[in-house]
Image (spheres, rainbow, N blue to C red):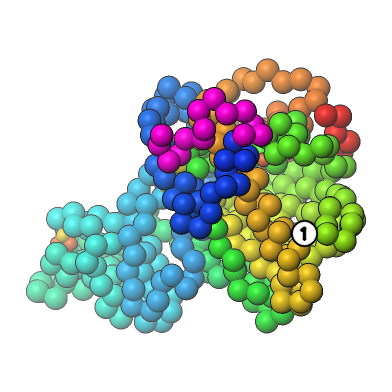
Amino acid sequence: MSEVEPPPGANAAATRAYLAALNGEELLRWRTAPLSPRPSPQERGIELPLPFGWFAVCYSDELAVGQVKSVRYFGRDLALWRGEDGEARMLDAYCRHLGAHMGFGGRVHGNLLECPFHAWRYDGSGAVREIPYAKIIPPLARRACVRHWLTDEKNRLIWAWYHPDAIEPMWEVEEFPETVSPDWTDFERHEWLVHCPLQTMAENGVDVAHFRYVHGTASYPDWQVRMEGHRRETTVNAKMETPRGSVDGTITAGVVGPGQPWTRFTGICETLLVTGCTPVEIDTVHLRFAFTQQRADRDGPRAGVARAIIRDICRQLDQDKVVWDRQRHVAQPLLCDGDGPIAAFRDFFSQFYAELHRQSGPKVVAPQRMRRKARI
Ligand code: FES
Ligand SMILES: [Fe+2]
């Protein structure tokens, strides 16, 4: 059996039990394994383009001053480096001279990235600033690349702006004060490779009916969702079961553009989940969950509950992944009255597909509010 296979023929409860039994290294391997066999995107009906927006490409502490890293996102090989000024920069990995991959053996020279092959040195715009063995830098090489990658560093993550037409950022990365507060813990980190388009994952948040069948919840609480411009926000008032009985809690979840989801849990144990969901290819997403909790909760008498919250959220993601990894994209789904606002969500998400708006101009999403009591 492949490592990404759930037990053959298992029903949802057996799949949950199988996942719950995986731990430590075994679980990490399962979460990040390649999909095998891997049907082509076409076979799965995945013809969605990559959405534009800000996406996490690295944790800040994974890139030291003077370090170069090779990463692959947006269907491209990329080289990421941190200059002596502390700033993170990113370029397409292949050198404009003779095509060496600068993420392998490249080094940092001041704030420039030096190619390992003949030491051409690039600034963050992709312009060649120095060639140690040449008297003249070719004029074309002196120009910035059409596609250079704007980066930002917030919430202890490095973010890159992706747009297929290299259009400048249309909004900023949102900063969460908890991520720089001494009263909140360092991140507890979890990661997955999910084999589906980003839109499929994002749709899960409005897919009301799946909670019962995939996650085994008895009901789904009262919730409201609001979509406006490039933001979507959902508020859920939930009764959460704890060892001390049922507690009223609130979950607020939002997403800034397609690539910066966040979730705040209040009432039982203050928790912020900062999420990075970055397309690797059109059918693969690298997902990062970074949890921070109030130190008073995490180190105090509620430490058990604090850990349980994180464990449960990650387990839910594991359960979703089993479906997402094999799901076909249905462009025109047949929906029923018990489904959540899936059509409205898709309309919202489509604003991030530049390819759809090249003819018609950018889409303006009017505010929409929805409120629903689940009937599942
Ligand atoms: S290939 Fe990069 S400097 Fe020659
Ligand atoms: Fe889910």
* Residue situated in front as seen by the camera: 165 or 293: 293
Residue 252, position as x, y percentages in the image: 78, 54
On screen, residue 289 versus residue 150, left or right, reads right
Residue 255 sits above or below residue 68 on the image = above
Residue 265, position as x, y percentages in the image: 77, 59
Residue under the image location 43 percent in, 79 percent down? 86
On screen, residue 215 versus residue 191, left or right, reads right
Q: Amino acid at mark 1?
A: Phe
Residue under the image location 86 percent in, 29 percent down? 375
The answer to whether any part of residue 165 appears in the image is: no
Residue under the image location 80 percent in, 43 percent down? 225
Q: Which of the 4 image quadrants contains residue 37?
A: top left
Residue 361, position as x, y percentages in the image: 58, 36
**Neighbourhood count class around disc 1 (C-alpha, 10 Å): few under 14, some 14–19, many 20 upward:** some
Residue under the image location 85 percent in, 34 percent down? 374
Q: Residue furthest top?
A: 334
Residue 347, position as x, y percentages in the image: 67, 33
Q: Quadrant of ligand 1?
A: bottom left
Magenta region includes residue 32? no
* Residue situated in front as seen by the camera: 287 or 151: 287
* Residue situated in front as seen by the camera: 373 or 354: 373
Classify the position of the N terminus by image quarter.
top left
Magenta region includes residue 3? yes
* Residue situated in front as seen by the camera: 106 or 127: 106
Classify the position of the C terminus by image quarter.
top right
Q: What span is colored magenta in the figure?
A: 1-14
**Residue under pointer 1:** 265
Q: Secondary structure at mark 1?
A: strand
- Magenta-highlighted stretch: main secondary structure? loop
